[in-house]
Amino acid sequence: MPQSVLSIERITALLPAPIPDRAWDDLLFASKAEVVARDGDALTLSVTPDRLDLLSEGGLALYLAGVLGVAHGIPRAVRPGPGSPGLVFEVDPSVAPVRPAIAGALVRAPEGASLDVGTIDEAVRFQELIHATVGRDRRAASLGLYPWERVTPPIRYAAEPIRAVRFVPLGGDEELSGDAFFAAHPYASRFGALGRVGEDRCLVLRDRAGAILSLPPILNGRSAGEARPGDRSILIESTGRDERTVHESLGLLLVVFAARGWTIEPVGVERVGSPRDPGEAAIADRAIDLPSRLVREISGTSLPAPEIEQRLSRTRLAPRPIEGGWRVGIPPWRPDLMAPVDVAEDVVLAAALRPEDGIIPSSRTRGRLLPEIRFRRSVALDLLGLGFAAPHTPVLVSEESVARWGGARPIRLRNPVSAEFAYLRDRLLLSHLPVLAHNTRHGYPQRFAEVGPVVARDPAAESGGATRYHAGLAVAAETAGFAEVAALVDYLLRRHDVGSVREPFELAGMIAGRSARCRVAGEPVAEMGEIHPAILSSLGVPVPVAWAEVDLSALWPFVRRRDAP
Amino acid sequence: MSGASGGAPDPAAPAALSAPERAVLESLRSARDLPVEEEELAGRLGLGLDVVRGSLQRLRSKHLAVVDEESTTTRELTARGKAALDRGLPERRFLEALRRHGGSLTPDEAIAEGIADEERSAAIGILRRRGLLEDGLPFRIRSDAPEPGRQLPEEVVLEQVDSGEEAIDEAIATVLERRGLVRTLHRSVKRWSPSEEGRQLPLAAPGVSELGALTPTLLAAGEWKSRPFRAYDVRAPVPFVTGVRPNPYVAWLEEFEELLIGLGFEQAEGPLLETEFWNNDVLFMPQDHPARTIHDAFSVEDVAGRAPAADLLARVAAVHEGRAMPGDPAPIGPGWPGRYDAGVAARPILRSQTTAVSARCLALRPTPPFRRFSLDRNFRPDSVDAIHHLEFTQCEGIIGEEGLSLRHLIGVFRELAEGIGIRELKIRPSYFPFTEPSVEGYVRHPKLGWTEIFPGGVLRPEVTRPLGVEVPVIAWGIGVMRLAMVALGINDIRELFADDLVALRGGGS
């Protein structure tokens, strides 16, 4: 879950009254944010992945103001229109292969206000959070903030030769060549590949005066890319793989400024051969039509229309009645609201959900186990009745077990966490060898059995591997031998009225000439044998071990056929 | 466990009396001079000492005879000791030779006197330690030496040992033993009596052979009517037997299944190795969702999966891309950014959520109303410690019927909570890509306190409609391992994967 540390002081500065310490948990319980820790001014919150806006002080304050009833609807911050002259990105076709989408907004401080250190910190922290989440670590989208007063519009977005790049990277004092930057700068090491076009070019945002705003998505330049306290107009841009992700990233960051009354202007986008995009779609409110029927269906309650409107307003949306429902204005920092059902959820969750409102579905259905599961349970019970202890072992088995057994390699994980859990067992024996090793400190005889899943290669299966259920048993005793386990398999099959034929079959890990396979109607359903002394010796087992494994999935069709009416 | 009898019982002892045992026991019972030594018994019975000793040991293991064991230590002269007693100790003979030669003796004269090399060395050493001999050669008696005619202490002890005296100088006796003149004998004397059980044990009349095992032949012949049975030693050790019990965790899971069956749910299951399509895509999880990176699901080597049926794939691709499904007039929603990749859909991964099973259930288009549940294993890359395991069990349920709403989901939460004995419940908003609304049920667990336990919601139309399901479907899941740990009193999740056979037998081992 995304998590961040917020300043309580900066949140409450946007509210008419402070929130008592003890009230935070209750206030947020009905939200998609959760208090992880509170330490002085630091409020650590985690949120569900759809409500990143709540991880900025501005966004959380907007939400709380609605919950507390001191504000409603969308802050009227967007100033639509053509925007300032020259407020445009000129996009060169050279960016298309790697990062074609770009959008921007110009935010202006309200009268008498300007950028302060706290807002810069909040914006930068939230920007990084967006990079890590929506931006998929900058691969899908990234953001940049620039002091508009120190930018000479228009701004060109193009792939330029790296050798043509010279700039002072943000946070540095020394001018670097493009080659030097890509060779040594830590941000270039981390994100450089995302901003390179071929071997010798990189993405550059440059103003008309030639100043480099940034090398998207890597790092801003210092001269035109460093917002400072006192700045009153900030240009925000977002570049990325697709327009929608770029808009979502930009829209989320806007909440930091909208919550403080900054106005938002669109930034146009010009591309060769295309009409100019005024850029309003990136910052304007969207509208989703919410049918009143949908609210009723989802909530299970007939809420009065004023109640629905009030809930929508309190969640900082802008409802307008239309035929059969509402047209709901959605601010750009709520990309989670994609469809009517999402807006309906906001209505339903705007009021606390009470357990006593729960009702039981009216229909009655008959519960049951799947017949095949009943069959497997009965085999497990048979084995218990035969005196076999019942371990429960993981499906993932170790490299050591697979190597020790020495048979055909089962399916291996591409990204195992450890050698202990590296393969999917295709027979329970691979889990049961460690069971034998773990119990050498106990006396003998030992008898154990398990009914459990295995995963076998199967080209016919959709995933390339079939889940099958086996019954595996082992007898470790001075007198253990083939005859005993063969007799047990005979019993298990006979117990389910299935006749079988046993035939010699050499099996990995078994003593040659002392292993066999059982067939039912030609289908192999069981294997058995005496485990080779080399394996027993490596396990530290001092007595012979006889083993058998029945493929219950293979057996089931015969059992089912018998049970069929 | 050990036998109820004392001493050192022989586990291999027969449970009945053999003829020699019986004879020995009868002899003990009739003896007037108890306890009786083994040799005495052997003499009385005319049996070999070994036979008597073996019988006595077996009677003892059957608690029919008791023994008083006495250990004695005695010394006797060796052959050399006896010779020394006859001829005189070497040091005595050396002194006498000196006297014969006027108090001085050369080595050659000593040899001529018949004193062997080894005897001479020992004699010279002893006489010098006693202060009777000067240093250097020839050998001379010291002028201040005590009267040589007096008896040496070694000679006194040698005579005492020979005469069987017990009060002797132990230090000198030990020296003589080292010189090979004396040896120590340890002897154990066992004296036997019948135990109380041995006195009371009914014995068949002499000449009547007792029956051992009751065989079918004996039964058929009716021989048991004319011969007595040999009595068993019922306190003798018996073979070690252990029982088994159902695996506690598996039993707990089965109980949980019974709860759901009682609530009208039918069980379902699906493959552990899934495709990304069923694990993610069909659940409307965007293909570039952070949770779908290689670190959040296990992928496998050398296995090729395939995409589902083309029509289903087309419908799911359409909702992901925000297009209208084939045959539909309008999209369900705006979908996700980016192009849908059928190649990603075909990739095999280990199932990371049981919701994949629910999706497969829905794809079968069950007739409403329906309730399905799956209780099964899932896998996520995670560190393994006391509270995390990369193989975990989830329980997931879906209900589909006309008119279902969030209120029904909350009602189901209440039923489930009551089913596991919990009455306090609270609900808060949550988020899952495949449900809207999404909520989280918290219960006040008697041991865990307020605990997040029921994630759930109403499946999005982007999930149900491509699968052809036209009724609302509510879905919920439970992380059952934590509940199981509390119920079973386990503090370490790894203990749920139990393989200690003694613990699995349920103790008594």
Image: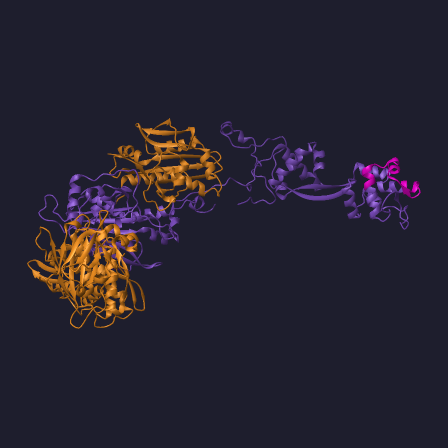
Task: Please name whichever residue, B382 or B41, is drawn nearer the observer in this view of the structure.
Answer: B382
Judge whether residue B99 is colored magenta: yes
Q: Is residue A138 above or below residue A379?
A: below
Q: x%, y% of residue B16?
A: 58, 35
Task: Please name whichever residue, A368 or A276, is drawn nearer the observer in this view of the structure.
Answer: A276
Q: x%, y% of residue B188?
A: 70, 41
The residue segment tinted magenta is: B97-121
Residue B184 appears in which quarter of the rendering?
Answer: top right
Q: Is residue B63 above or below residue A306?
A: above
Q: Which chain is orange?
A: A
Task: Please name whichever residue, A254 or A460, is drawn nearer the observer in this view of the structure.
Answer: A254
- Residue A350 seen in the current view: no
Q: Is residue A263 above or below residue A544?
A: below
Residue at x-position 73% and y-position 44% = B72
Q: Is residue A130 left or right of residue A281?
A: right
Residue at the left extreme, as displayed: A323
Kindly report the secondary structure that dominates the magenta region of the rendered protein: helix
Residue A19 appears in which quarter of the rendering?
Answer: bottom left
Q: x%, y% of residue A313?
A: 14, 64
Judge whether residue A285 is colored magenta: no
Q: Is residue B463 above or below residue A561?
A: below
Task: Please name whichever residue, A461 or B146, is drawn nearer the observer in this view of the structure.
Answer: B146
Residue at x-position 34% and y-position 45% = A416
Residue B195 appears in which quarter of the rendering?
Answer: top right
Write down the colour of chain B. Answer: purple
